[in-house]
Image (spheres, coloured by chain):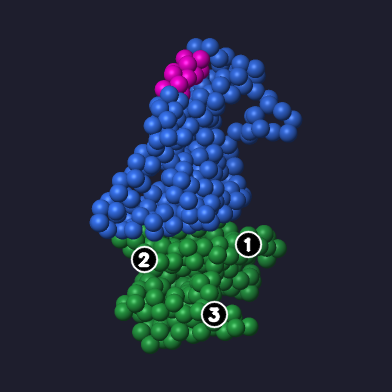
Chain colours: A blue, B green
């Protein structure tokens, strides 16, 4: 796809995602039934859970494309990695804000070292390192390699972090959708959750494409600057 | 066998360098003792008993002290392009990494035993239910730490930020090591049976193997220029 096509596609998907987000908010506030035990506070679930899934997906894509970049050294893979990592930071931040807000009401405390919240916090910091490494190198190519190493070690560490923080403590509500006996969520809640998930994916894809086309332009600027110095 | 010889040569070179400058061992050792002195005043003994928090403090001292030493792994050699010489030798990059990690491990393990000895002395602690298991937990923890530490010391020394970047990169990754290390140490110091910490020690071992393997494999991508 041409650079222009990427940008147009990115804009279109982002706009679509934002409109979808408005719809999700409206449905979450006015349409879906109120959860009987947790009350109104549970409605944040339709933002929190899709944001968490999207963040994990984005970080997963970033780690995978980073590993492939080290292997194939294709600039496009690095651009995809940085675009996905940035999306992961955005949705991770949403997850980290909405989680404690809900926790204050449901648990009585903002933060209680709940395993999945802790894992997201650590992932957020691992990818903060990813961006710091990239921006602190004089040679961009070196920064890309360093950042890829950070992402790969981070991905390898995730099972250990997960096991250890679960071992340390677990208070989080158990999964209500992805479990062997099928979803236990009432119909309208499940529909809204899935719709919201789709909206978040569209928004992520839109932002990803926009970010990717910016990286393309940046790469072009860099290579032209190099040619200019050679000539 | 040539591979082991190459690793041994790197380890020997690093230890000799350390023996002659004594830069890192002295700074890490002094840090450990001084940190214990500060911790003495950081604990109000009318509220908590030192043995209740000792395990956490021991591991924090090892991590911060270790960061001090590991962060300088590539410092001395950065002068006069000495490290370029090491990289240009026919030694495979993973052997260079393993040599560096092993020499760092020997230094840090020595320091971590010193940390425990100092805490025993200052806080009047017992050596726990199994000194062997304690030594094993400290050894595996140190190995995991230096593996990640050496890899990311190479990364951070290649950036403008230098060592200030190192804690940001390694602290999130060290969480499992701290959880299992402190868990095992705390229970051993509280005279619980060894069977209770076997799982934690196995996880420390798995973590160390993952970190050492990842470091050995990924080091080549950090130092290629």
Categorize mark 2 by other alpha carbons within 10 Å: few (<14), some (14-19), many (20+). many
Residue hosting label 3: B7
Residue A124 location, x and y as percent? 45, 45
Chain under numbered label 3: B
Marked residue nearer the N-terminal end (3 or 1): 3
Q: Please state if B4 lies on the left or on the right of A21 as rendered.
A: right
Measured Cα–Cα span from mark 1 to mark 2: 27 Å
Residue B80 in the image, given as x and y percentages of width and height: 31, 79
Question: Residue drawn 58% across and 65% down?
Answer: B213
Check residue B157 in the rendering and tell me which mark sits there, or answer none: 2
Q: Residue at x 38, y 42 (%)?
A: A215
* Residue B14: quadrant of the picture: bottom left
**Sequence order check, earlier mark of 3 and 2:** 3
| Vertical comparison of A98 with B214: above or below | above
The secondary structure type at the circle numbered 3 is: helix
| Depth order, front residue of A166/B57 | A166
Identify which residue, B60 or B176, lies in the foreground: B176
Residue placed farthest to the right in the image? A181
Q: Which mark is residue A46?
A: none
- A176 and A53: which is toward the camera: A53
Q: Earlier in the sequence, mark 1 or mark 2?
A: 2
**Residue drawn where x is 43% and y is 58% of the image:** A146
Q: Magenta region: which residues?
A: A15-29
Instruction: Confirm whether circles 3 and 1 share one chain.
Output: yes
Chain for mark 1? B
Residue A167 sits above or below residue B134 on the image:
above
Q: Are marks 3 and 2 in contact (CB under 8 Å)?
A: no
Q: CA distance from mark 3 to mark 1?
A: 22 Å
């Amino acid at each position: 796809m041409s650079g222009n096509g990427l940008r147009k596609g990115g804009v279109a998907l982002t706009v679509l995602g934002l409109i979808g987000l408005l719809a999700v908010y409206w449905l979450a506030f006015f349409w879906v039934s109120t959860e009987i035990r947790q009350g109104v506070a549970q409605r944040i679930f339709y933002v929190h859970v899709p944001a968490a899934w999207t963040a994990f997906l984005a970080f997963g894509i970033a780690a995978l494309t980073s590993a492939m970049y080290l292997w194939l050294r294709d600039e496009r893979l690095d651009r995809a990695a940085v675009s996905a990592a940035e999306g992961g930071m955005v949705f991770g931040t949403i997850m980290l804000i909405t989680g404690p807000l809900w926790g204050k009401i449901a648990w009585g405390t903002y933060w209680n070292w709940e395993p999945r919240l802790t894992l997201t916090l650590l992932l957020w910091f691992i990818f903060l390192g990813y961006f710091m490494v990239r921006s602190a190198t004089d040679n961009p190519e070196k920064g890309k390699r360093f950042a890829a190493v950070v992402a790969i070690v981070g991905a390898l560490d995730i099972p250990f972090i997960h096991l250890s923080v679960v071992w340390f403590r677990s208070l989080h509500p158990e999964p209500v959708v992805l479990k062997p006996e099928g979803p236990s969520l009432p119909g309208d809640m499940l529909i809204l959750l899935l719709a919201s998930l789709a909206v978040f994916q569209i928004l992520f894809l839109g932002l990803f494409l926009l970010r990717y086309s910016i990286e393309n332009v940046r790469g072009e600027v860099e290579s032209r600057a190099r040619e200019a110095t050679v000539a | 066998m040539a591979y082991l010889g190459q690793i041994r040569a790197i380890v020997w070179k690093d230890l000799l360098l350390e023996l002659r400058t004594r830069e890192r061992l002295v700074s890490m050792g002094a840090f450990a003792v001084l940190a214990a002195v500060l911790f003495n005043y950081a604990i109000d003994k009318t509220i908590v008993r030192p043995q209740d928090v000792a395990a956490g403090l021991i591991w924090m001292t090892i991590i911060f002290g270790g960061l001090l030493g590991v962060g300088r792994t590539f410092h001395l050699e950065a002068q006069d392009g000495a490290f370029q010489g090491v990289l240009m030798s026919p030694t495979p990059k993973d052997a260079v990494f393993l040599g560096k990690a092993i020499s760092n491990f020997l230094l840090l393990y020595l320091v971590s035993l010193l940390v425990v000895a100092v805490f025993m002395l200052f806080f009047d602690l017992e050596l726990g239910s199994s000194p062997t298991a304690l030594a094993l937990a400290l050894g595996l923890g140190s190995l995991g730490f230096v593996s990640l530490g050496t890899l990311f010391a190479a990364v951070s020394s290649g950036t403008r930020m230098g060592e200030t970047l190192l804690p940001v990169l390694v602290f999130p990754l060290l969480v499992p090591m701290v959880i299992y290390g402190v868990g095992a140490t705390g229970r051993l110091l509280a005279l619980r049976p060894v069977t209770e910490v076997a799982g934690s020690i196995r996880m420390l071992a798995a973590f160390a193997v993952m970190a050492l393997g990842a470091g050995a494999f990924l080091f080549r991508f950090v130092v290629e220029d």
